[in-house]
Amino acid sequence: MSIDPLASSLHIAGSGLETQSARLRVVAENIANARSTGSFAGADPYARKTITFEDELDRAGGDTLVAVKTIGVDKTPFRIEHMPGNPAADAEGDVKMPNVDLLFEMADMREANRSYEANLQVVKQTRQMISDTIDLMRS
C-alpha cells in the first residue's frame, strides 16, 4: 500500500470503476445481441462474450489493482430454434440462436452495477475525507 492511504483508496477504487465499466459494456453487448442469428443458412450466430479479471500491481504506488485480463468468447453450444421463415434457417427450418441467457446477463448486469456503485461510493467518501482534512488544516 502506498504512503498516502487516501490516494491509494482513490487509485484502487478507480481501477474497480474501470473494470466494472468494461464488464457492463460486455453484458450490454450480450443483451443487445441475444437474438442475433447468422446472416445466412447455417451461419453461426452471435457468440456470448465473457470477461475475466486479474490482479495488477501498481509499482509506483505499491497498490494491488484490478484489471481486465481478457474478453473472450463463451464456448457453450448455440441453441437451436425451429423458424422455417428465417433467412438463417437450414434445410429443416432450424436456426442457430446465440448462447446468451438473458436471465444470467441481467443478474450479471445487476452485480456489475452494484460493484460499480460501491467503488463510486469509495471515491466519494475518500474525496470527502480529503476535503475535511483540508478544512481542518485551514482552521
Image (cartoon, rainbow, N blue to C red):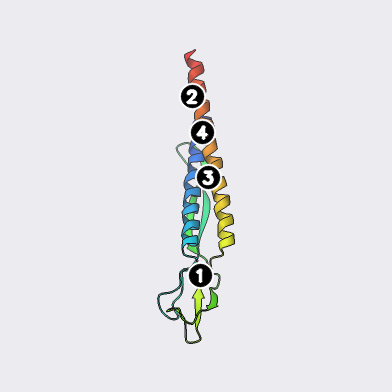
Q: Which residue is mark 2?
A: 131
Q: Position of residue 9 (x, y in %)?
A: 52, 35
- For marks 3 and 1, give the CA distance: 27 Å
In this rendered view, identify the residue nearer to me: 83 or 117.
83
Q: Which residue is mark 3?
A: 116
- For marks 4 and 2, give the CA distance: 11 Å
Return the disc, 1 or 4, that comes first in the chain's sequence.
1
Q: Which label belongs to residue 124?
A: 4
Return the disc, 2 or 3, that comes first in the chain's sequence.
3
Q: Position of residue 68 (x, y in %)?
A: 48, 52
Asked whether the residues under the numbered discs 3 and 4 touch, taking CB atoms below 8 Å apart as contact, a structural biologist would say no
Q: Which residue is mark 1?
A: 98
Tell me what residue is drawn at x 54 percent, y 53 percent.
109
Disc 4 marks which amino acid?
Answer: Lys
Q: Quadrant of residue 118?
A: top right
- For marks 3 and 4, give the CA distance: 12 Å
Secondary element at tag 4: helix
Secondary element at tag 1: loop
Q: Residues within 10 Å of mark 3 (few under 14, many from 20)?
A: many
- Viewer-nearest of discs 1 and 2: 1
- For marks 1 and 4, give the CA distance: 39 Å
Disc 2 marks which amino acid?
Answer: Ser
Residue extending furthest toward the left: 39
Asked whether the residues under the numbered discs 3 and 1 touch, taking CB atoms below 8 Å apart as contact, a structural biologist would say no
Disc 3 marks which amino acid?
Answer: Tyr
Disc 1 marks which amino acid?
Answer: Pro
Q: Position of residue 94 (x, y in %)?
A: 51, 81
Q: In this rendering, is residue 65 above or below 96? A: above
Q: Residues within 10 Å of mark 2 (few under 14, many from 20)?
A: few
- For marks 1 and 2, give the CA distance: 49 Å
Secondary element at tag 2: helix
